[in-house]
Amino acid sequence: MQEEKELKISVVMPVFNEADTIGEVVERIRRIPYQKEIIIVDDGSTDSSCEIIKKLSAPFIKKIFHKKNRGKGASIKSALPVMNHDILIIQDADLEYYPEEYPKLIEPIIKGEADVVFGSRFIENGRYSSLIHFVGNKIINLTAAFLYGKKLSDLLSCYKVFKREIIKSIDLQAEGFGFEAEITGEVLRRKCRLKEVPISYVSRSYSEGKKIKRRDFFTILWWLFRTKLKKRKFNKKATHE
């Protein structure tokens, strides 16, 4: 891995109806002291997000527009072909997460300790927005541990960071929030070194624009099982080079 001062990062940002926050998120990413590209994918927004994105002007910003809403996984799949840098970071377009914490998310990869890093909202503070979210997260993380033998505290965290060769080697299929389960399962099937680091988090309510719904709980569980049972078609050696 390159020295940190030479590191180049690709930030993939799916957007669906985030007109109130996207400008501030992009500005906060811009201030992070890495060479970077921001790949913004408007996923069929029905508010003014699309117009705001079109007005953003910087050489490091790439823009992709979906004609209709397809989901988080579809947005990330659309971004991968134009990703050019060493490390990929997934960033939501709201203000629940802090781009200022990129350095500690990237650090385990720079040090050669991990191939993939998940930011965990619960390692240090352990706070959930509701009892339903607490129970749902516990069931999902326990299911992943049972299927893949890896204990995680926050499979559903937005902040997932990958070496370029890892994320490029995975043929993603899930279009919606099933992506969170599919990518986790694929990483663990490949025996990639996955590390969690604590992150800060401010939860939004559904009235403030929170997107994940209760029905997505069942979709995520289904993708955990589907990925586990999928026939192995990958080259394990390639994912570690």
Image (tube, rainbow, N blue to C red):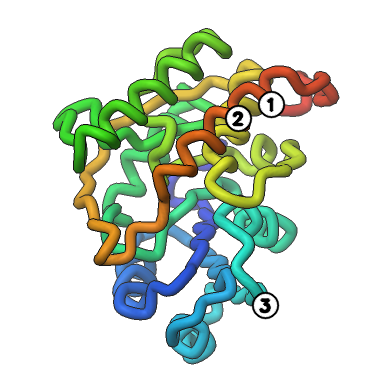
Nearest the eye: 155 or 140 = 140
Q: Which residue is mark 1?
A: 226
Q: Are marks 2 and 1 in contact (CB under 8 Å)?
A: yes
Gap between marks 2 and 3 measured at Cα: 27 Å
Which badge, 1 or 3, comes first in the chain's sequence?
3
Residue density around tag 2, few if under 14, some if 14–19, many if 20 or more, within 10 Å: some
**SS type, badge 2:** helix
Q: Residue furthest front?
A: 215
Residue density around tag 1, few if under 14, some if 14–19, many if 20 or more, within 10 Å: some
Residue 77: x, y in percent?
Answer: 68, 54
Kind of residue indicated by mark 2: Trp
Q: Dividing the image into 4 quarters, which one contains the C terminus? A: top right
Residue at point 77% right, 27% down? 238
Left or right placement of residue 234 versus residue 220 in this view = right
Left or right placement of residue 76 versus residue 25 in this view = right
Left or right placement of residue 126 versus residue 22 in this view = left
Query: In terms of image quadrants, where is residue 52?
Result: bottom left
Residue 218 visible in this rendered orientation of the protein:
yes
Which badge, 2 or 3, comes first in the chain's sequence?
3
Q: Is residue 179 above or below residue 146?
A: below
Q: Which residue is mark 2?
A: 222
Residue 146: x, y in percent?
Answer: 51, 9
Q: Are marks 2 and 3 in contact (CB under 8 Å)?
A: no
Kind of residue indicated by mark 1: Arg
Residue at point 37% right, 79% down? 19
Q: Nearer the viewer, mark 2 or mark 3?
A: 2
Residue 31 visible in this rendered orientation of the protein:
no
Residue at point 48% right, 68% down? 15
Residue 168: x, y in percent?
Answer: 71, 43
Check residue 67 in the rendering and tell me which mark sits there, or answer none: 3
Q: Dividing the image into 4 quarters, which one contains the N terminus? A: top right
